[in-house]
Image (tube, grey):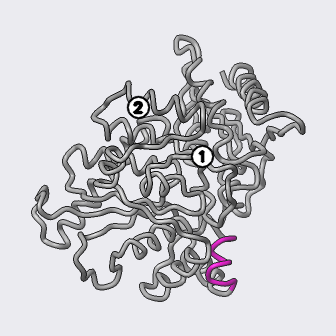
Amino acid sequence: MRAVSEVRTQERKYMRILVHYPLGQISAFQRRQLTTIKTGNARVAAFEGTGDDMDVPIKRLLLSNDRTTNRICGINSYNIGRPIMQVVHFVWTYLQIAKCLEIVPGDKSAPIDIVIPTGAMGNMIGGYIAKLMGVPIKFLCAGVNANDITHRAFASGEFHKSDAMTRTLSEAINIQVPYNFERLLFYLTGSDYELVNQWMTTMDETSKLTLDSTWLLKLQAEFRSARIDDEEMCATMRKIKDRFAYMIDPHTSVAFAAASRLGYDLGDGKGDKNPVAVMATASPCKFEETVTVAIGEKAWYEYYESEVSEDAKRILSCEEVPPMIYHRTEGLSLEETQNEWEKIARTIIEEELC
């Protein structure tokens, strides 16, 4: 929403934006954040597919971009600028824990662990960059849902694309192939771009990459993970609300549940593990449907009335501008469909936004 909101101002008259989202796979609030902002500088399009299906067309658009005429960039985490910005979150988090526990900042003998709700792995890369820069982080831990390719990669070295994306109540991390895993491997190998290129070529051709035992051990020396289903996610949301009087969103709940599964004590902090931080992703007000499933309608109403901001409430009452729909034509393969979507996106960019 912030990006769409920014381009509507007079000061941004030379900036345009084209936003894509998977039809029916974001919350009503998230959709309204995009469709209630009226400006000629932005177009919003929903595509009939999963969250991964638009990745290939966007990648081709960016790679074919002639930056001398139409200066196009993406602002999701495939743009390295986003993980670099997120480094700040991890530095700040470490400093807060160091202050709280009276750790001398930078003391390598007293590292922390961080658990992250993980989809495309953008935040994971931000944390890894922070670690490589010297922030004392021991383990970066991924909390994933049923779309668990990251968990399988960390546990067994099998970065294998599943046959289909599974719908879950934590939809923002429903990812079949996290594109930032390539970056993780690049940093893990000490910037061995030839080896990483070889691995990713294999992945592109076969939808499977299996790391050998040497690289798996190196991966496991820095990363951990846990797979959380919807029932456990909902139970954790209720647990955090009851225990700490704090409401978390579904994706943060996946990370909290993963922390518990990995053996971290989220109550008194006792135990033999490093201090741990759980990264939160968003306000629960964006996910009314899922939060209501987890805590019930009465508890949602109480939360909405007492904690949801007036700005957020206004979004729910604004008139929507219907998004453009990229349809999936019956009989076409995914590759053929992606080619069609790419053509539509190019036309919008060239004829309407440039």
- Tell me residue 86's x, y (percent): 38, 48
Q: Secondary structure at mark 2?
A: helix
Q: Which residues are drawn in magenta?
A: 289-297
Q: Is residue 168 in view from this perspective?
A: yes
Quadrant in the rendering for residue 225 = bottom left
The amino acid at mark 1 is Lys
Which residue is identified by label 2?
196
Q: Quadrant of the C terminus?
A: top right
| For marks 2 and 1 on the same chain, the one whose residue lies earlier in the sequence | 1
In front of the other: 59 or 89: 59
> In the rendered view, would you say 320 is above or below 95?
above
> In the rendered view, would you say 34 is above or below 71?
below
* Number of other residues with Cα within 10 Å of mark 1, as a class: few under 14, some 14 to 19, many 20 or more: many
The amino acid at mark 2 is Val
> In the rendered view, would you say 8 is above or below 348?
below
Q: CA distance from mark 2 to mark 1?
A: 17 Å
- Tell me residue 181's x, y (percent): 45, 43
Q: Are marks 2 and 1 in contact (CB under 8 Å)?
A: no
Q: How many callouts does the rendering have?
A: 2
Q: Secondary structure at mark 1?
A: loop
The residue lying at 78 percent from left, 29 percent from top is 336
- Tell me residue 168's x, y (percent): 66, 64
Which residue is identified by label 1?
161
- Tell me residue 167's x, y (percent): 69, 60
